[in-house]
Amino acid sequence: MNSKQNYQWKEMTMAVCYYPEHWDKTLWEDDLNRMLDAGITVIRIAEFAWSLFEPEEGRFQFDFFDEFLELCLEKKMKIIMGTPTATPPAWLTEKYPEVLNCNIEGIPYRHGGRKHYNYNAPVYQELSARIVTWLAEHYGSHPAVVGWQVDNELNCETCEFYSEADSAAFRVFLEKRYKTLEALNQAWGTVFWNQTYTDWKQIYIPRLTLNKGVNPHMHLDYFRFISDSTLRYCGMQAGILRKYIKAEDFITTNGMFWNVDNHRMQKDCLDVYTYDSYPSFAFGLDRYPKTATDLNDRKWTKHLHEVRSICPHFGIMEQQSGANGWSTRMEGPAPRPGQLTLWAMQSVAQGADFISFFRWRTCTFGTEIYWHGILDYDNRDNRKLAEVKEFYKKLKTLNPVCGSQYVAGFALLKDYDNEWDTEVDVWHERVNSFSEEEIFIASELNHTPYDVVYLQEDSELEDLIKYPVVFYPHPVLMEKKRVDLLKQYVEQGGTLIIGCRSGYKDLNGKCVMMPQPGLLKELTGSDVKDFTFTSSAEEEVYAIWNKEKMEMPVFNDIMDASEDARVLASYENSYYKGEAALIEHSVGGGRVLHLGSAFSRKNVTQLLKYTEVIEPFAAWIEAPNTVEVVMRKKDGKTFLFVLNFQSFAVSVTLKQEMKLLYTGESVMGDVILPAYGTAVYEVI
C-alpha cells in the first residue's frame, strides 16, 4: 500500500519553532505567554542543541532544558523534541574528523555549517545513538513532550556523500545486493571503458572524473545506497526512541529532500511525516516572478502533492512566516499582508492538519539572521503576529476538515528507480522535469487536482483503481511486475497515459534490445520505430488531433500502431509528418494512450478533456485559473478551499449554497476574494 501512518492529529493544531538557547532566560515566560495568546500550543525545540546536552565527550547535562520544559509544563505548552544530530559539536568533529562528509574531490566539509557529517562513519553512528539514548531516557516520559523529530531535514544542504566511510559502506551494500563481482560487473556493464572489477576494494563511491563520465549504472546504485544509508540512520534513532517514549507520543522527521525513499522512511521509521514549506523562494531576488511560467508560489502545491503521497494527513514543521535568507545566500522580500495565511492555508488544503511556523523570532546572530520569523529583532508586536492570530481563528473553524480526504481528478504515477535515473541521465531528466511541471500547471489552471502515487514493492491494484485516469509520464526503467500491475489497472477499466521515452531500460539502467516502449509494448499497442529530440533549429512540432493542433514538445516518438490499436493524432510537420503521434489501445475494460512527446499544459488539457476528467468541481464553483480550488470530504460532508494567489481581488461564483467556515455565514453566487485571500466552504 502507498500510505501508512500511525499518528493523526485529532484537531487542527498551530505550533512554532523556538530556540530557548538563543534567548536570555528572562524572555522565556513572556515568549510562551505571547505564543499561547496567539493560539500556539506546541513548540519544536532542541534539534541543534547537542553541545548543550553533551558539552564534552561523555559528560551529559540537562539542567538548561529541564528548566525550560518545567516552564512549558507550567504554561501547558506542549513540546516536540528534536534529536540534535544535524550539527555535531566542535569537540566531536575535532576528535573524529572521519565523521565529516566530503565533496566529490574528497575534501572534507569543515565544522561551522550544518549537515556536514556522513551517515556511515561508525563513530558518528555510535555517538549519535548515545546522545539519542540519553535524551530519550531523560525526556521520554516527560508530560510536556508529545512528539519527537529525528535529526533535521535529512539530506538537506547536500544529498551526496563522498567520505571514505561511504566507500566502505557502499561496498557492503553492493556485496549484499549482487553477491558476486561477476553479477555486479554484468549489471553495471563494466566491460565499457575498462571498468571491470576484480576485487571489492576497487569499488568507490563516485569520484572526480573527466567530464563527469561516471558509469550511469553504478551512479544509479549509488543513489539507492544513499537512500539506504539515510533510512538506516533515521531508523536507528527511531528505534532507540521507541524504547523510552510514551506510547501516545509520535516520531517524525521534517522532509522532503533528495536521494531518499521518503515513502519507506515513513512506513519503516516514522509515525507521521512533516514537511518544511517555504513558498517565498518563488520571489527570491535571483528569480523573475513577473515572467515566470511556473505559477511562482502556487507551485508549492506540487511539492505538497508529493508529501500527501507519503503521508495523507501530514504536518508542516516549518511554515513560512517571514523572508528567507542567510548571511551568505538567499535574498527575498517579506511575505505581503495575507500571504502568510495564504501559504499556510495552501498547506492545509493539501492535507496538513498541523501548522508550525518558522520561527517565533528572527535570530539576532549566526548564519540565519535573515531567515525571518513571526517577530523581528525588536521583539515588538507586528503585522505578522496579528496575521498569525487571525490565521489561528480561521484554522480552528476548520476542525471539521481535520483528517478529511483529498478529492483528486486523476493520479500521477512515479517510482524511485525512475526518479533516481533522472539524476544520472540528462536525457531522461530534461524530458521528465518538463512534463511533471507542465502536468501540474495544466492541473492547476484547469482546476483538476491530482494525487501522486508511487509504485513500490507493496503497491496493489487498490492503489490505482480509484483513479479513472493515471499519467505515468516517462517510465524509462521498467520491470515485468510493474507492467502486470498496470495491466490489471487497465483491464479493470482504467485509462493509462504514458509519454515518449518509456520502457527502454531495465532496473539497472541498461537499455534493452527490444522495440520501444519495451515491456509496455503489449499494453500500448505502439511500436516506436524512430525517435528524436525536437530541434531548436526547426519550427515547433505539432500533431493534428480531431482537426485541432496538439503540441509535441521536447522529444518525439515516431510510431506505428498495432492492428488492434488506433491512431488518434498524426504529426503535422518535421521529417516524420503524417506518422502516428498519439495511439490509443483498448485492453480489457480500459485503454492506454501513448503520446509520442513530452507533456505540455496544452496537450494535457486536451487529454483531460478527452478522458472526461477535467474540472470535476464545475458543478460547485466557477473560478478564474489564477485561483486554486481544492475539494476535501469527510463524514459525508464536502469542503471547498478557494485560494487567491494574486496581488489583486478576484471574483468566483458559487453555484450552490455554501457555508463559509471562517464566519458561519451562508453564501451563494458571486464572491470577491481579496488580494491573497482564502476561503473554505462547506457545501450545504
Image: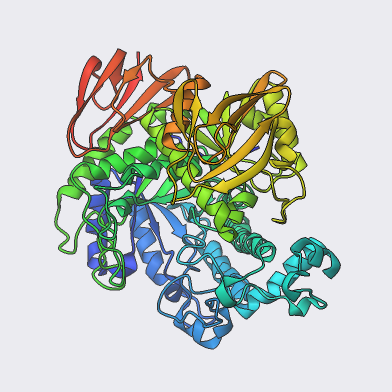
Where in the figure is residue 57, as x and y percent of width and height? 53, 82
Quarter of the image with the N terminus is top right
> Which one is nearer the viewer's eye here, 660 or 346?
346
Where in the figure is residue 183, as x and y percent of width and height? 83, 64
Query: What residue do we see at 51% from left, 62% from top?
Result: 155
Left or right of 586: which side holds 352?
Answer: left
Left or right of 254: which side holds 218?
Answer: right
Q: Relative to 479, does residue 31 appear above or below in the rendering?
A: below
The image quarter in which residue 474 lies: top right
Query: What residue do we see at 64% from left, 77% from top?
Result: 165
Query: What residue do we see at 76% from left, 79% from top?
Result: 201
Where in the figure is residue 397, as x and y percent of width and height? 31, 29
The mark tally for this picture is 0
> Which one is nearer the viewer's eye here, 220 or 291?
291
> Which residue is the extreme one toward the bottom?
95
* Residue 679 visible in rendering: yes
Quarter of the image with the C terminus is top left
* Residue 613 visible in rendering: no
